[in-house]
Image (cartoon, helix red, strand yellow):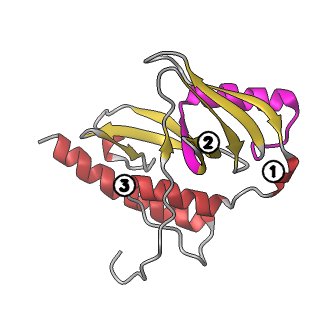
Amino acid sequence: MIGEVPVKRVCLGVLKIKCGMTCEGFVALREVLGFNVHWLLGRSYMCPGEDCAACFAGVPSRWNGFLVVRARVGHATEMRLLELSSAAYERFAGLVRMEGWPDLAGVHFTAVRSRAKASLYVEPLDRDEDRAAKALSPLRCWEAVACLYGLPVPRPDESLEEWEVRARSAAGRLVAFASEKASR
């Protein structure tokens, strides 16, 4: 927005699990970052919910989730966003609950995609209590998602709820613009 002081964005890459790939890592946040998205003009846009131009135009939405993970990528261990479908997340979260773990932080996992167009399977292996105790702040993690979707960055003095109001408003403007452009 005009007049806002620029704030350095937290940008994390998306960890893409490709055909035949297996990846191992640890979940760095207590919960999943999830929301509905619309596919417009070759990219996804966060659905603002109420008064969404894409919803009114009949553009379908789907739930999209991200686990903030520390995973081995090549020869380095990096912080990334592991993108999950609703089915992949529900399965993973169910397995975590079956283990009796209170949340996702510190869960050691393996992620596998057996073939092209196959579902992603994320399997919990165990849980590291030291890593769970060092879980990241949700607000800082939402900054990375905001960076991906072109949304405003949370302000240092802002609560998650206050930022969400601003982010949904910005998402509404982005979706309205993309919907209008797509209908031409």
Amino acid type indicated by mark 1: Ala
The quarter in which the N terminus is drawn is: bottom left
Which one is earlier in the sequence, the residue at label 3 or at label 1? 1
The residue that label 3 is drawn on is 172
Residue at 61% x, 62% y is 139
Q: Which secondary structure lies at badge 1?
A: helix
The residue that label 2 is drawn on is 72
Q: CA distance from mark 3 to mark 1?
A: 35 Å
Amino acid type indicated by mark 3: Gly
Does 12 sit above or below residue 179?
Answer: below
Q: Residues within 10 Å of mark 1 (few under 14, many from 20)?
A: some
Does 18 sit above or below residue 170?
Answer: above
Of badges 1 and 2, nearer the viewer stands 2
Q: CA distance from mark 1 to mark 2?
A: 18 Å
The quarter in which the C terminus is drawn is: top left
Is residue 92 a member of the stretch shown in magenta? Answer: yes
Residue at 47% x, 27% y is 18
Residue at 48% x, 36% y is 16
Q: Which secondary structure lies at badge 2?
A: strand
Q: Are marks 3 and 2 in contact (CB under 8 Å)?
A: no
Q: Residues within 10 Å of mark 2 (few under 14, many from 20)?
A: some
- Magenta stretch, residue numbers: 79-105
Disc ID at residue 132 = 1
Q: Residues within 10 Å of mark 3 (few under 14, many from 20)?
A: many
